[in-house]
Image (cartoon, rainbow, N blue to C red):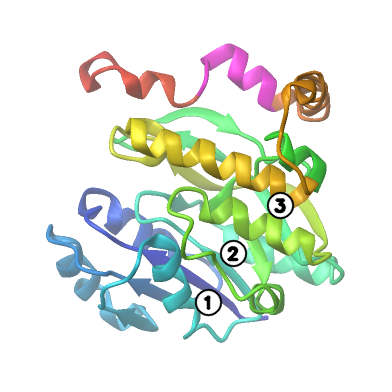
Amino acid sequence: MTISIVTLSFNQGKFLEEAILSVIDQDYPVEYIVVDPGSTDNSRRIIEKYRDKIAKIIYEPDDGPADGLNKGFVHATGAIWGFLNADDFLLPGAISHIVECFAQKPHADVISGHGIVVDTSSKRIRKIYSDQFSLIASAYGMAILVQPSTFYKADVYKKINGFNVGNKTNWDDELFVDIKLHHGVFTQTNKFLSAYRIHPSSITGGASNLVHTNIQNYEAARFRKIMGRNKSWYDWPLTQMFRLRKHVKNPLNLYERLKYGAMYRRFQKSESEI
């Protein structure tokens, strides 16, 4: 079974090499594609250092991350696809495990594992667990997948025409929603497959007020897309019900949150306080 991974790189030279090595050092061959729309730091020098291990390098402008990923997947030939941000990294054995999962679950279109949250120095902060994915839970914001630990069949990506280029903040979540709306089958593995990095310049760790507004706008649009109506005040009890349901179905994630706090809060502090 062939697998393709796309990394979108833009001025993340501080973390990029770790991301690249985590892919090319896997114990299973990967068709690796790296897209860089115009980094001005040392990212391109790092990419060139590993050119002979990368199947395709794309240096051209894009209209945001979703567009860049779409440009990368145009060149993908694998049966299973995934994408890894330049500031995240895969854990050892992740690819061979996910290939085995798809072989054992041929009915599945999307398989998600779990991950660890790390800081700027790759120090482990806490574990993070993917939820069981359903449309109604997603509508209420209670179905979260660990993105770098989530892989999907190429056919389902092509069926929905890839990422929504207009989505500048939650392109990954919208992809999964669109796959589910097209009757995609989601399942899980209990394996930890990736490290998800939170840092002051990441969307999760250091988002501006504008980004937070865009996220809120997306959440409202996601609700309309799934439910066919706008969210209103009487949805508040349902939101709380689905929050409780999420915690009951994913108690390990609740434990990590209670023990360590929300994963982004410590990055609202200065680096010296971490």
Q: Are dots 3 and 2 in contact, CB under 8 Å?
A: no
Question: Few, some or many C-alpha atoms within 10 Å of disc 1 (few <14, some 14-19, many ≥20)?
Answer: some
CA gap, disc 3 and disc 2: 32 Å
- Checking the image for residue 239, the label placed there is none
Secondary element type, mark 1 = loop
Asked if 200 appears above or below 21 in the picture, the reply is above
Q: Amino acid at mark 1?
A: Pro
Q: Is residue 250 left or right of residue 122?
A: right
Residue at the image point whose x is 22% and y is 49% from the top: 14
Q: Amino acid at mark 3?
A: Lys
Say which of 114 and 96 sits in front. 114
Label 1, on which residue?
29
Q: Amino acid at mark 2?
A: Ile
Which quadrant of the structure image shows residue 93?
bottom right
Residue range highlighted in magenta = 253-262
The disc, 1 or 3, on the residue closer to the chain's N-terminal end is 1
Which quadrant of the structure image shows residue 187?
bottom right
The disc, 1 or 2, on the residue closer to the chain's N-terminal end is 1
Task: List x then y, in percent, for residue 259.
Answer: 58, 13
